[in-house]
Amino acid sequence: MSKLSVLANEITTCTLCPRLVAHREEMARVKRRAYRDWDYWGKPVPPFGDPQARLLIIGLAPAAHGGNRTGRMFTGDRSGDFLYRALHETGFASQAESRARGDGLKLTDAYITAAVRCAPPDNKPSPQEFQQCRPYLERELDLLRGVHCVVALGKLGFDAYLGILKDRGVIAARAPFAFGHNVVYKIAGAHVLIGSYHPSQQNTSTGRLTAAMLRDVFERARGILQSNK
């Protein structure tokens, strides 16, 4: 078993954050009416993708009735619909939809993870919960040796990545790296970082993030990877 697989298994058994444990299990017990026949995952959601990936995608956390139900990142909710369509159109995903584990979706040259691995109440992890979960992201960054470009979906994922770089002495401060959509930072001693609005329903339903805008992010990432060959 690879070190990434060992780490993924370790993540799924994590119980470090009592509030998140209680919430994810309660959501799995109560369920949403539309999914009452589902056997919810109800555990921390492991990362997903190509272990040789050059692109790392960092989200915020699983959705209570998305990843927490299906057991796979960005699978079974509208955020995932937006994300995987963009990844499919730019050659990173084998299909444009992701409904369940085992649906045949495969990622090529991309790996998806999150700053927090359990569904949080109101989609808002606490600062302590971010810190408790951060070592998993740090270990992934160390194990995914082929990564050249990071796409951070949302400011919280963006800040989580920069926080690791700051604590490792790669950058002196986070302040020079302002979050924005499709902003690119070439950081010496680290990966190329692209910020993106999160494909949350709040952003996509209001038009703050459109399908074309998200596709542009991954087209830019594709161009960065091609220029690094």
Image (spheres, rainbow, N blue to C red):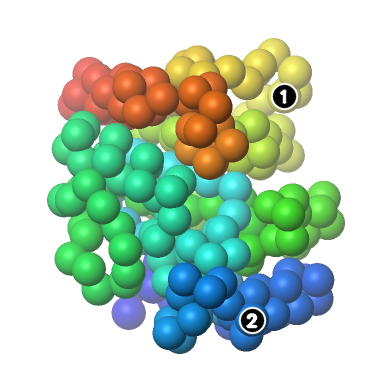
Relative to 29, 103 lies left or right: left
- Crowding around mark 2 (Cα neighbors within 10 Å: few <14, some 14 to 19, many 20+) is few
**Residue type indicated by callout 1:** Arg
Q: Residue at x 33, y 22 (%)?
A: 212
Q: Residue 94 placed where, x, y %?
A: 16, 51
Relative to 173, 81 lies left or right: left
Q: Quadrant of the N terminus?
A: bottom left
Relative to 161, 5 lies left or right: left
Relative to 190, 29 lies left or right: right
Q: Is residue 162 above or below residue 70?
A: above
Is residue 222 in sight in this rendering? yes
Closest to the observer, 100 or 219: 100
Q: Which mark is residue 30?
A: 2
**Residue type indicated by callout 2:** Val
Mark 1 → mark 2, Cα distance in angstroms: 40 Å
Q: Is residue 161 above or below residue 218?
A: below
Q: Residue 98 placed where, x, y %?
A: 30, 58
Q: Which residue is mark 1?
A: 174
Q: Residue at x 46, y 75 (%)?
A: 35
Q: Residue 102 placed where, x, y %?
A: 25, 73
Closest to the observer, 37 or 224: 37
The picture quadrant where one finds residue 105 is bottom left
Q: Is residue 2 above or below residue 117?
A: below
Q: Quadrant of the C terminus?
A: top left
Q: Residue at x 59, y 65 (%)?
A: 64
Disc nearest the viewer among 1 and 2: 2
Badge 1 marks a residue whose secondary structure is: loop
Closest to the observer, 27 or 169: 27
Badge 2 marks a residue whose secondary structure is: helix
